[in-house]
Image (spheres, coloured by chain):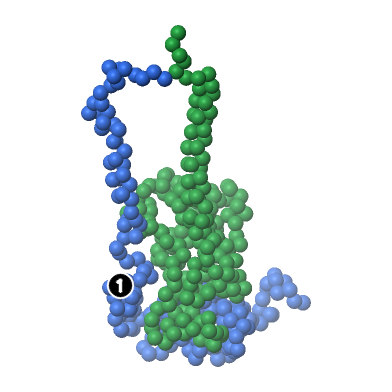
Chain colours: A green, B blue
Amino acid sequence: MSAQIFSRNANAILLVSIAAIVLLIVGIISALIGLYLSPWYTGVGDAIEQPVPFSHKHHVDQLMIDCRYCHSTVERVAHAGIPSTDTCMSCHSQIWTNSPLLQPVRDSYQTGEPVLWNRVYDLPDFVYFNHSVHVAKGIGCASCHGRIDQQHLTAKAQPLYMGWCLGCHRAPEEHIRPRDEVFNMAYEPQMMPIADRLALVQEYQIPVDGRLTHCYTCHR
Amino acid sequence: MQPVAPSLRRKPTVMSLLARFAWLPLCFVLVGCHIDMYDQPKYRPNRPSDFFEDGRSMRPPVENTVAMGSFEADSALFTGRLNGELAVDLPMELTADLLERGQTRYEAFCAPCHGLAGDGNGVIAYRGPLQVPTLHNDRLRTVAIGYYFDVITNGINRMYSYAHRIPPEDRWAVAAYVRALQLSQNVDADTLTAEERALLGGP
């Protein structure tokens, strides 16, 4: 009788090893997904340093200034518009006129050199997002920008992954609101019964035939 | 363990060699991962430029440029004036929609200083050392409506021009809404119906 090639406990070792390898693979994949979604990787919630520590909380929540006062093209064109220095100065030529924090704005107004704000939301260049159509179809600022009226310093509220965009493009009724609530930061789409939201989707002529999830809707 | 007899060891064939090194081309694929498509060499709004001296990719228009269709020198719609005089009539039909549009524009752009009711106690006026005149006096109630268009377009005193933020049609909507505001603050209570008086909450 020839000697056994494998010892008796080889069966157990084999089973344990297979289980360990499967767990390891699942673990690595979950860890990668977790990492990919984590604020550490996406930068959600990290305030970006700016030349002037502009506070949306102060201007929107406390002073109740409408989004459109500064982002005046949001209803008309793709780009919401970073306000020009002139817009800042239309108030700050009168109030806070000596604040050292606003020196870059005053310098810009005098010299014509732009204030170099740092980008917070950076979509890939192959995505063509249009603010005006979303606003016109009843998608609120807060749906993407979160409660920016509660942010002292501006940070991303969403990583802007494609799956997240598609979530709304597949089921707009989950995120739609009446047009006159678009700029209301405290409004939640769920305040409205689903039947009414479905009616809004129809009233605002949002295509539900699948066109919203075609590649060319966002990519050209 | 017993050594395997040489005769049992399989000779490596070409195919097995290929299979063993099949991962190599994968490395070339991974080397191809970069973000050129993510950051394409093109300008999108507000993007900086190292081509232009002032660092801006959004070019300021040449001075005195007028965009096609955005201005006609003899049109009240764009100038607020007819034959050099401030326009007395709206250059469009007065509708409830126009007033509603005027209200949203007024509340977004004017109310911070002029206040929601137009009496000059907006939140900016409240925070600063700023005296904002009320819209409810005889001079402003009787002035030609083109005056409001003109002030929004060109600014006045310490008020900046809002021309680049409010398109001409919307400026007229605001002017019409200001008229409605003025009426709301200066109407004889006897001319109201009983229902309307009840809404006022007074006796």
Q: Residue at x 37, y 52 (%)?
A: A217
What is the x, y in percent for residue B62? Answer: 29, 81
Q: Chain of mark 1?
A: B
- Secondary-structure class at tag 1: loop
- The residue drawn where x is 42% and y is 44% is A209
Residue that label 1 marks: B50
Q: Is residue B38 above or below residue A170?
A: below
Q: Which image quadrant: the N terminus of chain A?
A: top left
Q: Is residue B2 visible?
A: yes
Q: Nearer the viewer, residue B131 or A12?
A: A12
Residue A142, visible in the rendered structure: no
Task: Out of A51 and A171, give the one closest to the viewer.
Answer: A51
Q: Is residue B130 above or below residue B67?
A: below
User: Which quadrant of the rendered structure holds the C terminus of chain A?
Assistant: bottom left
Residue placed farthest to the left in the image?
A: B14
Rendered location of residue B143, percent (x, y): 51, 88
Q: Quadrant of residue A111?
A: bottom left
Is A190 or A150 nearer to us in this picture?
A150
Q: Amino acid at mark 1?
A: Asp
